[in-house]
Amino acid sequence: MSEYWFNVNTKQIEEGPQSDWSQLLGPYATREEAQSALAKVQANNDKWDESDAQDANWDNNPTNDTD
């Protein structure tokens, strides 16, 4: 079974890792899943940013708020 990788520099799908590991996201089971890799990364980043913002105010002390 093939594995698919998304190359973040070329924005191309690779069947099997063909580039340096630092340029790849994956492995993914399908070409379609690899093609949506950046969207998945962005969605995860958005969730983590939201979580970080909530964590910044964890103690409910207004003098500790960064905003």
Image (cartoon, helix red, strand yellow):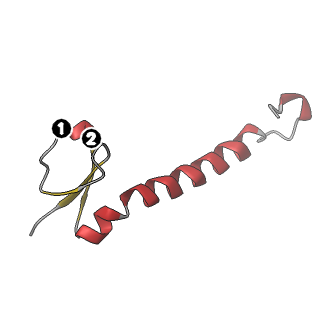
Q: Residue furthest front?
A: 10
Is 16 on the left or on the right of 63, as rendered?
left
Q: Nearer the viewer, residue 66 or 6?
A: 6
Is there a contact, CB below 8 Å, between mark 2 and mark 1? Answer: yes
Residue furthest to the right: 62
Question: Looking at the picture, which amino acid does disc 1 mark?
Answer: Asp
Residue nearest the observer in this picture, 45 or 65: 45
Residue 12 vs 2, above or below: the answer is above
The structure residue drawn at horizontal position 18% and vertical position 38%, both measured from the top left corner, is 20
Label 1 residue SS: loop
Q: Name the residue under label 2.
A: 23
Q: Which residue lies furthest to the left in this view?
A: 1
Image coordinates for residue 23, horizontal then vertical, percent: 26, 40
Please determine whether, in this image, residue 67 is positioned above or below residue 52.
above
Q: How crowded is mark 2: few (under 14 residues within 10 Å), some or many (20 or more)?
A: some
Residue 47: percent from the left, percent from the top?
59, 54
Q: Residue at x 29, y 71 (%)?
A: 32
Q: Is residue 52 left or right of residue 40?
A: right
On residue 12, the disc is none
Kind of residue at disc 2: Gln
Residue 66 location, quadrant: top right
* Image coordinates for residue 21, horizontal then vertical, percent: 21, 40
Q: Is mark 2 on a helix, strand or loop?
A: helix
Quarter of image, res 16: bottom left
Q: How many marks?
A: 2
Query: Marks 2 and 1, Cα distance to the nearest angstrom?
Result: 6 Å
Numbered badge on residue 20:
1
Q: Which quarter shows the N terminus? A: bottom left
Q: Residue at x 73, y 38 (%)?
A: 56
On-image quarter of the C terminus: top right
Q: Where is residue 31 in the image (x, y as percent from the top left)?
A: 23, 68
Where 40 falls versus 59 (above or below)?
A: below
